[in-house]
């Protein structure tokens, strides 16, 4: 968020038009982050820091759900392909997605058995 956007945020938040979650602004009625296709965006716009962790969570859940169960090591590359349309991924991007994945496993929103990850329940 740039300086100009930060200046407008308190007014919009005060009017109930947005709410802040970390570095990201959300509509007040949003319960879950939208999963957006960025595959057609220019490379300069395909940066992981432009994606809220909540959207990465949604992408992880989608990838795991679509596969029913998935090897944990395969999840980051699949998430980055889904979110950003990357054919190849960097070590840093994979690390960030793995950190988010580990946190939702710890929070017990996903189940890990051996190397396999699946939806809870």
Image: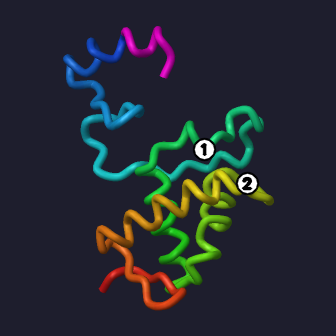
Element class at badge 2: loop
Picture residue at 46% right of the left edge, 9% below the top = 4
Q: Residue furthest bottom?
A: 114
| Residue at (44% x, 59% y) in the render | 57
* Residue 98 versus residue 117 in the image, above or below: above
> Secondary structure beneath disc 1?
helix
Which residue does the image show at 21% across and 18% down from the upper left? 15
The circle drawn on residue 13 is none
Quarter residue 83 falls in: bottom right
106 or 51, nearer to the observer: 106
Residue 106 is left or right of residue 88, and the answer is left
The span shown in magenta is 1-7
Q: CA distance from mark 2 to mark 1?
A: 11 Å
Image position, residue 85 (x, y; %): 72, 54
Using the image, determine if residue 28 lies above or below residue 12: below
Check the picture and name the quadrant holding the C terminus.
bottom left
Q: Is residue 33 above or below residue 101?
A: above
Q: Is residue 44 left or right of residue 65?
A: right
Where residue 104 sits: x, y (%)? 37, 66
Callout in the foreground (2, 1): 2
Q: Percent x, y for residue 34?
A: 45, 49
Q: Main secondary structure of the magenta part?
A: helix
* Label 1 packing within 10 angstroms: few (<14), some (14-19), many (20+): some
* 104 with respect to 49 (left or right): left
Q: Which residue is mark 1?
A: 48
Residue nearer the viewer, 97 or 84: 97
Q: Residues within 10 Å of mark 2 (few under 14, many from 20)?
A: few
Magenta-span inclusion, residue 75: no
Q: Which residue in the structure is indicated by mark 2? A: 90
Name the residue located 65 percent from the left edge and 40 percent from the top edge. Answer: 47
Number of numbered discs overlaid on the protein picture: 2
């Amino acid at each position: 968020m740039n300086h100009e956007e930060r200046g407008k945020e308190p007014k919009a938040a005060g009017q109930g038009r947005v709410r802040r979650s970390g570095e990201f602004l959300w509509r007040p009625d949003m319960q879950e982050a939208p999963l957006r296709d960025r595959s057609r965006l220019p490379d300069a716009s395909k940066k992981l820091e432009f994606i809220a962790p909540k959207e990465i969570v949604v992408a992880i859940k989608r990838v795991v759900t679509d596969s029913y169960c998935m090897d944990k090591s395969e999840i980051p590359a699949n998430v980055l392909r889904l979110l950003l349309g990357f054919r190849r991924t960097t070590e840093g991007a994979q690390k960030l997605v793995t950190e988010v994945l580990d946190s939702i496993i710890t929070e017990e929103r996903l189940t890990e058995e051996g190397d396999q990850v699946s939806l809870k329940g």
